[in-house]
Amino acid sequence: MRNDLYYEGQKLERGQFLHRAKCLATVLKDHGVGEDDSVAVLLRNDVFYMEVIEACRHVGARFVTLNWHGAASGIVEIVKDAKAKILIGHSDLTAKLTPDVGLMIPILAVPTPSEIMTAYKLESLSLEGQTNLNELIDLASPIETDALRFRGMLAYTSGSTGRPKGIRREVDLAKPDPYQVYKGLAAALLQLTPGDRFYTSAPLYHSAPNALSTMSIASGYAELYIAAKFDAEGFLRDIERFGITHCYIVPTMMVRLLKLPEEIRNKYDTSTWRFSISTGSAWPQDVKRAMIDWFGPIFYESYGASEIGFITLISSAEALEKPGSVGKVLEGGSIKILDDDMNELPVGEPGAIYIDLPQFGDFTYSNTEGDLKGQRKGAHATVGDIGYLDEDDYLYISDRKKDMIISGGANIFPAEIEAILIDMPEIFDCAIFGVPHEEFGEMVVAAVQTVPGENVDLADVQAFLDGRIDRFKCPRQVDVHAQLPREDSGKIFKQRLRDSYRKG
């Protein structure tokens, strides 16, 4: 039975993987990391990411996934909020965390792999002045304790004000270890069988590809293939070369595949690929149908949330019968559609989506006071999405969390950007919102009203925001308005701004 790991084609045997992870667990323990502590992770896609997760399992620690696109100030804010004991990262990323950024914990670096250096066109970087974690691992003995209860990921999501908040899974010893739940989901959700090979190139700091990759490891019988970065032709090449059977790809990647020339699309044997799952942005119906026409009915879509987990699943056949649906709730879970007074709504009527998925456990936020009033009803919780159930219990999403933009699978909150952009001297007022984008799902747009006598363009806005905010959050279009549309209360009427794009 094959159950090894691969990184850009380089094989790591499962036994070697587990040995290194247990040695890393010893290093973590030597640095004071224990049960219920946190380890910050600043890595691009790398098999080593999975070693860190496995090591955290052996010491009972949570791992904090950091978006490596983030500015140093944002990374420091999250690390402090998570009370992380150490930070582990690729050397080119940790080199930017200089003493003046205020990160007062040990930083352990591993050399950035050559595959990443090539994929991202990075210049070679010495580890001089940084603590080489690989050397510590080589000197350590494997931890002798059995794996403790899996705490999993401490993922961060922006709140309505844009301030990051950590999603902390509560430990319930009366329920199965979440790692065993992951093992069960490897078969129930991913449909993995012995010898299958799961592929991901999506960033492992995102909760979905991270969890799915962990399921592959937890299964004990499937292989995991991690790519440094998605490349459309390279993806097809890897399927043929390595016999990929299962994939996590999102609509952005599918659009890039569909744009390949016909001769490239027909060049590779992809017959081993029989299952694909995606989360995040909803599929455009034309993209979904084109992918099914090309590869067959192998595509599954899941609606989920970092707070709750994978909520629904819908197959290709179901998607064609129920266009626009995200499927039925996973076995053991339930969905309620509630109005503002917490009354359950009838079939077909949209309201707040409340979900109970006991297999994933309950959650709290790291820095939210109170009892999350309005976000719970009994065992059911909501993340603010609006939708309805049909007569067959298929879920349809009508709207998302207020104002949130999903671009390329990343959650972006306009309030965070607006709070910074309003300080630009030339700008009197501004509104940030998302508009449909063929490749990324949504594009960030800034509508601005300038101070009388001033003018700005996209380059001006991006230059002002550079260094003040993560680059992936920067607007890709700036529209200057003589007057921004406002509601009677004086609040900017964003829906009217969005509608002008949809009508256009």
Image (tube, rainbow, N blue to C red):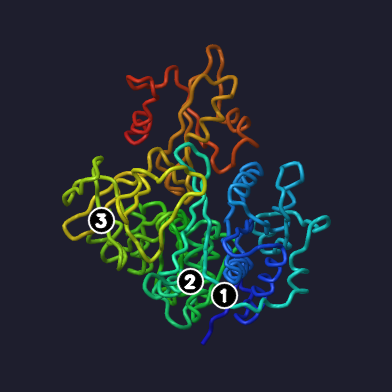
**x, y (%) of residue 338?**
24, 47
Please give the residue where the numbered disc 3 appears in the rendered image.
323
| Three-letter amino acid code of the residue under disc 3 | Pro
| Three-letter amino acid code of the residue under disc 1 | Ala
Q: Please tell me which residue is depicted at 53% across the width and 30% down the height of the picture.
A: 419
Q: Which tag, 3 or 1, sits closer to the chain's start?
A: 1
Numbered disc 3: secondary structure: loop
The part of the image, by quadrant, that contains residue 306 is bottom left
Q: For mark 2, does the 10 Å Cα neighbourhood hold few (<14), some (14 to 19), or many (20 or more) residues?
A: some
118 or 32, nearer to the observer: 32
The alpha-carbon separation of the residues under discs 2 and 1 comes to: 10 Å
Numbered disc 2: secondary structure: helix
**x, y (%) of residue 481?**
45, 21
Q: In the drawing, does residue 396 fall left or right of residue 33? A: left
Checking the image for residue 179, the label placed there is 2
Q: Nearer the viewer, mark 2 or mark 1?
A: 1
**x, y (%) of residue 232?**
51, 61
| Three-letter amino acid code of the residue under disc 2 | Tyr
Numbered disc 1: secondary structure: loop
Q: Mark 2 near mark 1, Cβ–Cβ under 8 Å?
A: yes
Please give the residue where the numbered disc 1 appears in the rendered image.
147
Q: For mark 3, does the 10 Å Cα neighbourhood hold few (<14), some (14 to 19), or many (20 or more) residues?
A: few
Q: Please tell me which residue is depicted at 18% across the width and 60% down the height of the picture.
A: 392
